[in-house]
Image (tube, rainbow, N blue to C red):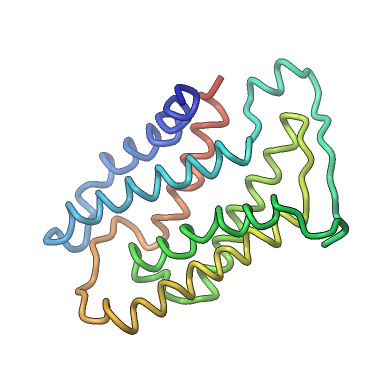
């Protein structure tokens, strides 16, 4: 539990700094507080995904003194496993939160590509801590992102359509949060 809290702080620290530096750029101040609360939820989710996936850090490189991770590039080479179901489940919130928080990410292709990119980043960083980067994980995480988006779209059609626009700091805000958070974990988490 302490490791997760520490990793979350490492993920949040660069994002908080970025928000403070860009606080004057928020487009809709009426929804600013709600937006910040939802972005903190997004940070907590992303840090949990990074923690559960076990991404490598600069400290792993120093302790192993080499980059020796395995790569499985054969899709669906193993019979369906429980971990594949967990990978789908782990990325459902990602596909839901992106369009819920950011209006620009209500495009299914943009959500799919962002989920794929986040998963690819996680898989690439697993090479630094001697884990196996698996194409199945990438596929399952992307499927989870799609399912999350479909859940959001369904709920949007039924309940949320009347909701007003949200506040945003930047048009690529979630991508900035992911990159800054992962860099924070990569360099600060030990």
Q: Is residue 115 above or below residue 160?
A: above
Residue at 58%, 63% (x, y): give it.
144
Query: Is residue 18 toward the left or the right of residue 133 in the image?
Result: left
Q: Is residue 189 left or right of residue 75?
A: left
Extreme residue toward the front, this view: 82
User: Left or right of 73: which side holds 183?
Assistant: left
Residue at the image position 31 percent from the left and 83 percent from the top: 158
Residue farthest to the bottom, as pictured:
157
Instruction: Find residue 53 and report its horizontal and vertical position in percent.
Output: 62, 41
Left or right relative to 139: residue 162: left
The quarter of the displayed image where residue 117 is located: bottom right
- Considering only vertical position in the picture, is 4 above or below 65? below
Front residue of 32/170: it is 32
Residue farthest along the top direction in this orientation: 63
At x 53%, y 44%, the residue is 49
Establish if 186 lies above or below 119: above
Quadrant of the rendered image containing residue 113: bottom right
The furthest residue to the left: 30
Percent from the top left, x then y, of residue 14? 40, 35
Please report the residue visible at 67 percent of the width from the left and 60 percent of the height from the top. 140
For the image shown, how many numbered marks are present on the structure?
A: 0
Q: Nearer the viewer, residue 171 or 135?
A: 135
Quadrant showing the C terminus: top right
**Residue 45 at what x, y percent from top left?**
44, 47
């Amino acid at each position: 539990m302490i490791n997760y809290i520490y990793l979350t702080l490492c993920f949040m620290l660069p994002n908080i700094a970025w928000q403070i530096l860009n606080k004057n750029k928020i487009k809709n101040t009426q929804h600013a507080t709600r937006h910040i609360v939802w972005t903190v939820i997004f940070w907590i989710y992303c840090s949990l995904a990074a923690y559960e996936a076990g991404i490598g850090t600069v400290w792993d490189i120093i302790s192993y003194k080499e980059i020796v991770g395995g790569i499985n590039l054969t899709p669906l080479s193993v019979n369906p496993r429980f971990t594949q179901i967990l990978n789908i489940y782990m990325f459902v919130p990602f596909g839901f939160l992106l369009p819920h928080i950011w209006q620009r990410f209500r495009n299914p292709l943009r959500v799919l590509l962002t989920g794929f990119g986040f998963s690819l980043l996680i898989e690439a960083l697993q090479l630094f801590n001697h884990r196996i980067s698996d194409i199945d994980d990438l596929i399952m995480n992307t499927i989870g992102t799609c399912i999350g988006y479909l859940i959001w779209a369904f709920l949007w059609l039924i309940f949320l359509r009347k909701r007003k626009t949200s506040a945003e700091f930047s048009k690529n805000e979630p991508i900035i949060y992911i990159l800054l958070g992962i860099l924070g974990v990569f360099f600060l988490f030990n």
